[in-house]
Amino acid sequence: MPSTEYRRYVALGDSQTEGLGDGDDTVGLRGFADRFAGHLEAARPGLRYANLAVRGRLAGQVRAGQLEAALALRPDIATVVAGVNDVLRPRFDAAEVAGHVEAMFAALTAAGTHVATVTFPDLGRVVPLARPLAPRLADLNDRIRDAAARHGVTVAETALPEAVADPRMWTTDRLHASAVGHERIAAALAHAVGLPGSDDTWTHPLPPPAAPTPGAAVVAELRWAAAFLGPWLGRRLRGRSSGDGRTAKRPALLPVAGGSAGPETTATASWPNP
């Protein structure tokens, strides 16, 4: 379907799709899905958009809790982004996780929906303690690419650009994209599906940052561990999720407020943990 004919967009996923890192629960969340909806609406005014994502969800939970609702909305285009929460769990089965993602690809494309997804960057490039997760992420990315190829799903390779390692692309918890990062993901999706006016500038580096002060990196690591790593581990030990008791922020198809996505900003935001 040509990009100008998209009339209904539905986003499925977890905290990244919900928009954590781009706003907060007080002023509201934006995120890459909202921003991508803006790009779509610029190409096809009158687009209606629903976001079924809930933070903390595993890939199987996204499939169980969002796929049926998404199909009922009969989207022309959908984004399916899930699996990182699975990667962070002690027990991780790449084949099982990719199987849930592929089942969503299959069901949506069989219904005539153009599906788009992304690959996941190596978190170890941003969080040194996450370097052991690199093989998991690489395996999952390869399986997502293979599944996408089987079902005609568009893949935005957001894992690849060097710019993804820039700390300004991430919030202070280093697990979610910042406002800048979310806009880059939206621009990557717009480019991948061939929207008018899109290009590869989302891969370009950000302007040079200010030089860090001596010892700033060590202090930042300690602050991150205290503010985010400790509480995250605590929730895992208690079997809790940040998504407990939450529902989708935009379960119905509604007009895209504000039209097209705004220009990229260098501002970052912090928000509740995944």
Image (tube, helix red, strand yellow):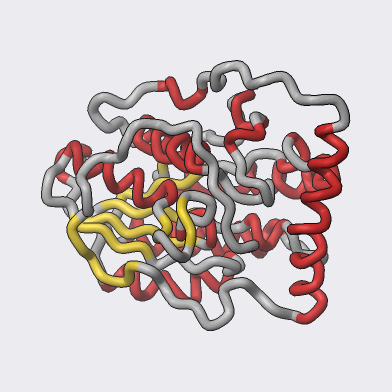
Give the residue drawn at x 51%, y 24%: 203
x 84%, y 41%: residue: 219
Q: Quadrant of the N terminus?
A: top left
| Residue 150 pos. (x, y %) | 47, 47
Can residue 216 be seen in the rendering of this structure? Answer: yes
Give residue 159's position: percent from left, percent from top: 60, 35
Is 115 located above or below residue 266 in the figure? below
Return the x and y of residue 177 as percentages of the image width and height.
Answer: 56, 45
Q: Quadrant of residue 3?
A: top left
Q: State the residue lying farthest toward the top.
A: 208
Q: Residue at x 17, y 51 (%)?
A: 47
Q: How many marks?
A: 0
Q: Quadrant of residue 211?
A: top right
Q: Residue 125, relative to residue 222: is it above or below?
A: above
Q: Toward the viewer: 242 or 9?
A: 242
- Inspect this view and state whether residue 155 appears: no
**Depth order, front residue of 118/49:** 49
Q: Is residue 121 above or below residue 136?
A: above
The answer to whether 220 appears left or right of 25 in the picture is: right
Q: Furthest residue to the front?
A: 213
Nearer the observer, 117 or 15? 15
Tell me which residue sits at (66%, 47%) in the image.
Answer: 172
Residue 242 picture quarter? bottom right
Instruction: Classify residue 207 as left or right of residue 221.
Output: left
Q: Position of residue 170 (x, y in %)?
A: 61, 41
Quadrant (top left/top right/bottom left/bottom right) for the C terminus: bottom right
